[in-house]
Every structure is written in C-alpha cells, then in structure tokens.
Image: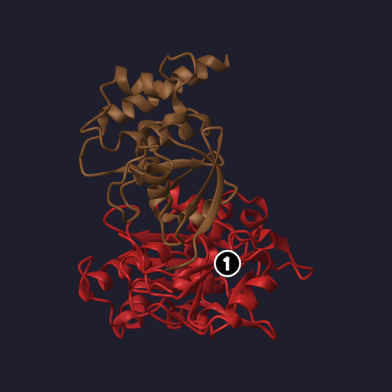
Amino acid sequence: MTRMVTVNLKINGKQYSEEAEPRLLLVHFIRDALKLKGTHIGCDTGHCGACTILWDGKPVKSCQILAVQAEGANIMTVEGLEPEDGKLSIEQESFRENFAQQCGYCTPGFLMMTRYLIRNNEEMTREEIREKLHGNYCMCTGYQQIVDAVQDAQRKYFATKK
Amino acid sequence: MYPKSFEYLRAKSVDQALQYLKDNEGSRVIAGGQSLLPMLKSRLYQPTVLVDINFIPELREVKLGSNGDLRIGAMVTHYDVIENSTIRENAPILSSTAENIADVQIRNRGTIGGSICEADPSADYLPTLMALDARVVLKTTESSREVKVEDFIQGPFETLAEDGEMLVEVIVPPSKANYRVEKYARRKADFAIASVAAIVSLSKDGKVVDARIATGAQQDKPHRLREIESALKGKASKSVNLEAIIGPATEELEPLDDLHGGPEYRKHVLRGMLSRMLGDLLSGKEA
C-alpha cells in the first residue's frame, strides 16, 4: 500500500483537507472524497473537457491532474457558479435561455469554460468562440446553441460592467 | 482509469528534486502532466516514484541572459509562452507555436520542459526550437550540461536525459527575423500530420541571408531540412525555383505511417506547406 498524502485545498471558497492516494485523479478526489458531484468524468483521456474546473481562475482538465498536485490550490467547480441569493449565474442563465444543453453531460465543463472566456476576452466572434471551446467538444456535433449561450453570457457580463 | 501505484515526492527546489531523482531508482519527473498522465493511465509508463516539480517557483521564470539569450524555465506553461512579452519580443515564432498547441485547458497546464522531454515525433515545439538552434540545460546533483534540442531528441519518446538528470531550462537565441510556423492536423487539437517551422532573413537587396527550416510529424523525430536551407542561402529570393529544391530535398524522407496519415500523404502535405510558407517568406511577406 502506498503512502497516503494529505491534500489541503480550497474549493468554491471552502477549505478542505482530505487524504489521497498519490495515483488518485483530481476529478475523482473532487467527486468521491469531497462529494462535489457536479464535475463530470467524460472520456478520462484529457480530450472531452467535461471535467473542466477553474484553477486560480484558469480552466484545466481535472482528469489530467493528480489530486496530490492540488495542494494549496484555489479551485472553482460548477457548484461554485450559483450566487448565494439562489438565482442562476450569468452562465447558467444564458445556457438555460438558449437551450444550450445538448445531452447535458458536458454542460458543467462548458459552464466553467464560459465563466473563464467571457471574463478574459474582448467581445468574441462565433469563430473565436468555437476555437476557444475546442477543449470541450464531447461526443455531439453542432454546438450552435452553446455558441449562442457563450455570446449571450458575454453580453450579459459586459452589461454588468457598464 | 488509474495509473499503477507509485510513491509521490513533492520537490520544493531544483536541488531537492535532483536529490529525489538520485535517491530513487525508477523515479520519473512529472511536470504539467498533460502527456504523462495519459501515459500513466494507459500504463505505458509505470514509475515507482513520481517527483513533482510543480512547486518550484524558479522553474517558472523567464529571463534574458546577459548575452541576449532567452532563458525559459522548464515549468513555463504554453499559456505563459503565448502571453509572456519577453518571449514574444525575442522569439515571436515560439509564441506563435504555443498558440497551436492542443486546447485552452491543456495550454494552461502543459509546460515547455515537459513537452520537450516527451519527445513526441509530432510535438509542436520541437521543429521551432530546432530552427531557433535552442539548447536545453540538464542538471544532476553533481553536474550541469547544455545540449542542443536537435541532439537531445533521440527518437520517439527518447531523449539524451540520463537517470537522475532533469531538464531545468531552455535557452533560446533571440530571433526577430520573419518566420512561418504551421501545423496541419485534421482537427486543431490533434497531433500534426505535418508541421513546419521556418525562419528566413532577407538582405535589403533581397538576398537570402539566413534560412532555418525544420519539420515534425514526418519521421521518428523532428529534424532540420538542411538541404533546402543551403539551397536557399545566398540566393536572390526572386530567382529561387522552390519546386526544384523541395522535391529532391524531401525525396529521401520516409514519413510515419499511422491512422492519421500514410507516408505518401504526409510527404505530399509537407511539400505543399513548404512551397507555400517558403514562397511567402521569400517574397518578404510579414507574418
């Protein structure tokens, strides 16, 4: 049996401290040890992006990182999107209004990516959005409504800045 | 998918990492992990000890050496290579190369040192670093040596790094000359079917002063196309017959054969890319 390692990290503003086997992937740690089931496991090979989380504000794939590497990390998962007042976040609201679910499995990853993209880019064209979403393409095709939702979310976000 | 069990050692300094590597037979460094983790999951690699170098701040630095060379820490991410103004000013071809790597998430986590050490024949950085005459700094607890990237890469997933040795820095001589870097893949995030990095300087009267061209995704490792380089050097750029040079110079290539493309297809793509990219560079079109 390999030595267990204690991992201290912050997720959605809350401090966690849990033991992890070194080979445990961060996505399993978040889902199974910390019981935050919103982050999905899709392909498990680093392609589909369903497991996308924000690490220090930047999107990464949590199936491509070991849990023990997240020591001291500041992470945001899809559970962290919802504001405390019970309303939906800009990203969630835009996905809902634009029917941007497709089968829904990839949605948590797309929401986290959207969170990052609308805050860290000037106004994006549809082509730019498609290019930036590359790391979230799952099993479907199309993604039309998802592109709509990202554009919509960015408009809504910019409106809050005015 | 889980990797096989291993011990995990978190290094806080380069010296500590090197000591861990020396003390533990069968140990392996984990950098950004974006290529290593899939290999661990598929159990292609089964290290007994993994030395994590993500917690070493000095490996994330970008500096300009006293001689003007760029010194890029092994743990500088692809995102940083794109965003860092020192890199973009001194080696814009490197920043452009990083823009084509995988996707946003991978670029936030993957590192230049990790990518070089993986030595994938289709890796995005390698042709560019070869065209730049870049070197890597390899350290052990006792020694430090510099090796040209071109020599460091030995073959598919094989480098000159020995047990206990770690890549700590990439040294890039500055190059502000006109360049082109492209990869051809069926989908953007895929590994290249053919990739080309080319740097060409023209004199005021249109002579080719310098030409450095490298290709990837063709053979077992990326390499320079020296026959084309020497055929171009000293020539008046307007009088060059590219087709007459590219054809024979790529005749001997025996490209890879895998599900992404057969040898003839890869060679065909490469020739098309070379003809278009070098044509642009010879006509002096800025990137």
What type is the residue that disc 1 sits on? Leu
Shade of chain A as shown in the rendered figure: brown
Supply the letter of whichever chain is red: B
Residue underneath mark 1: B202
Q: Residue at x 58, y 78 (%)?
A: B21
User: Where in the figure is residue B97, as x and y percent of width and height?
Assistant: 48, 58
Residue B234 higher or lower than A24, as above or below: below
Relative to the observer, which residue lies in front, B211 or B233? B211
Query: Quick one: which residue is furthest to the right in this view?
Result: B66
User: Where in the figure is residue B75, as x and y percent of width and height?
Assistant: 59, 62
Relative to the observer, which residue lies in front, B100 or A150? A150
Q: Is residue A36 left or right of residue B55?
A: left
Q: Is residue B87 left or right of residue A21?
A: right
Residue A157 higher or lower than B124, as above or below: above
**Placement of the N terminus of chain B among the 4 image quadrants:** bottom left
Q: Residue at x 79, y 68 (%)?
A: B66
Relative to the observer, which residue lies in front, B16 or B190? B16
